Image (spheres, rainbow, N blue to C red):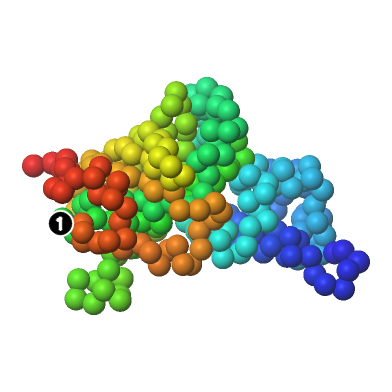
C-alpha cells in the first residue's frame, strides 16, 4: 500500500481483477508456478497490500493473455471482458506451433492500426433467431498481451414483453488486422455452443468509423443452424464496455431511427442470410 491515507484506486482495481481471474482458473499455486512468482508475494497482490513490480505486472498480464493496462480497469468493465472461459481456450490455441507461426505474421501491423480499432462498437446484423429483425450487440475491441481481443454481448428481448430477456449470448475472441482487412474469430462462452468468424474493411467518413463485412456462425448442435450474413460495426467511443452499453443490445425493427443510415444502407432492406435448406 502507499503511505497516503487514501487507498490507491489502481492497486484496488488490480487486486480485484486479479482475484476474479484466479477464481476462474481454480488453483492459485499452479498459477504462481506458471508465472514464476512466490505464493506469499502473490497473496499480497490478491489482498491489495502490495503493488507488483512492472515486470511482475507484465508477467501476470501475459499469463492471462491481457495487456497490462487492462488489469487496472474498473471492476465492472473488467468483468464484462473476462466473463466466460475464453482465455483458457485461447491460451491453449495460441501455444500450438501452427498458430504461433501464423500470429507472428498477423501481429506485424503498425501500432496506429491497432489503436484505431480499440474501443466500444454497436454490432449490427440481421438476426438468425428473430426473422426480419436487426440485432444490435454491444462490442468492445481491446489490447491483449500480444494481439487485439474482443468481447460482445447479444440480447434477445422476449416477444411478449420487451422489458424481459428471452436469450443472451456472450462471445470472446481475437481481432487480426491483415493487409487492410480485419479478421475476427470468437467463441460463445455462456452456452458454449457456437463459433463465429468475420472479415471487415474499415470505412472512414467524416469523424465516424465504420467497419463493414460478413460474419458466419457455426453452432455445436442441430437446433441452431450455421448462418452467414452482412454485418456492420459502428464505433461509439473509446474505452471498455459499461452497463449502459450492454443495455443497448436488442433485436430491432429495420426502421428503428437509432440505427445509423449507413448501416441500414449496407445491410439492405431484405435479410441476405445464408442458411442450410
At horizontal 82% and vertical 60% (from top left) the residue drawn is 50
* Quarter of the view holding residue 265: top left
User: In this picture, is 216 found above or below 104?
Assistant: below
Tell me if 20 is positioned left or right of 255 in this view: right
- Most distant residue in the left direction: 277
At horizontal 56% and vertical 65% (from top left) the residue drawn is 76
- Element type at mark 1: loop
Nearer the observer, 90 or 258: 258
At horizontal 62% and vertical 62% (from top left) the residue drawn is 74
- Quadrant in which the N terminus appears: bottom right
Q: Position of residue 112 (x, y in %)?
A: 58, 33
- Quadrant in which the C terminus appears: top left
Q: Position of residue 159 (x, y in %)?
A: 20, 71
Nearer the observer, 205 or 10: 205
Tell me if 91 is positioned left or right of 264 in this view: right
> Is residue 88 visible from the viewing direction of this image?
no
Tell me if 135 is positioned left or right of 160 in this view: right
User: In this picture, is 201 found above or below 55?
Assistant: above
How many marks the image carries: the answer is 1
Nearer the observer, 101 or 129: 129
Q: Position of residue 122 (x, y in %)?
A: 39, 53
At horizontal 77% and vertical 55% (from top left) the residue drawn is 42
Q: Position of residue 54 (x, y in %)?
A: 79, 45
* Quarter of the view holding residue 200: top left
Mark 1 is surrounded, within 10 Å at the Cα level, by few (under 14), some (14 to 19) or many (20 or more) other residues, namely few
Nearer the observer, 162 or 115: 115
User: In this picture, is 167 found above or below 125?
Assistant: below
Give the residue at mark 1.
131
Amino acid at each position: 500500500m502507499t503511505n497516503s491515507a487514501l487507498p490507491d484506486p489502481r492497486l484496488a482495481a488490480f487486486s480485484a481483477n486479479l482475484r476474479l481471474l484466479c477464481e476462474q482458473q481454480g488453483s492459485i499455486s499452479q498459477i504462481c508456478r506458471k508465472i514464476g512468482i512466490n505464493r506469499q508475494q502473490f497473496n499480497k497482490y490478491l489482498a491489495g497490500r502490495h503493488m507488483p513490480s512492472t515486470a511482475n505486472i507484465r508477467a501476470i498480464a501475459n499469463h492471462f493473455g491481457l495487456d497490462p493496462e487492462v488489469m487496472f480497469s474498473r471492476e465492472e468493465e473488467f468483468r464484462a471482458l473476462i466473463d466466460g472461459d475464453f482465455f483458457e481456450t485461447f491460451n491453449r490455441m495460441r501455444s500450438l506451433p501452427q498458430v504461433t507461426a501464423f500470429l507472428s505474421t498477423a501481429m506485424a501491423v503498425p501500432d496506429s492500426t491497432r489503436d484505431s480499432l480499440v474501443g466500444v462498437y454497436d454490432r449490427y446484423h440481421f438476426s438468425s433467431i428473430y426473422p426480419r429483425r436487426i440485432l444490435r450487440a454491444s462490442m468492445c475491441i481491446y489490447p491483449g498481451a500480444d494481439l487485439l481481443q474482443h468481447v460482445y454481448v447479444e440480447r434477445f428481448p422476449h416477444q411478449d414483453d420487451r422489458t424481459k430477456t428471452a436469450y443472451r449470448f456472450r462471445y470472446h475472441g481475437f481481432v487480426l488486422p491483415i493487409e487492410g482487412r480485419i479478421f475476427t474469430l470468437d467463441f460463445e462462452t455462456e452456452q458454449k455452443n457456437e463459433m463465429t468468424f468475420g472479415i471487415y474493411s474499415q470505412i472512414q467518413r467524416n469523424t465516424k468509423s465504420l467497419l463493414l463485412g460478413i460474419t458466419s456462425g457455426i453452432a455445436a448442435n442441430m437446433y441452431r443452424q450455421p448462418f452467414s450474413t452482412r454485418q456492420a460495426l459502428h464505433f461509439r467511443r473509446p474505452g471498455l464496455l459499461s452497463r449502459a452499453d450492454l443495455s443497448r443490445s436488442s433485436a430491432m425493427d429495420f426502421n428503428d431511427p437509432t440505427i445509423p443510415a449507413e448501416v441500414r444502407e449496407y445491410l439492405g432492406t431484405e435479410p441476405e442470410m445464408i442458411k442450410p435448406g
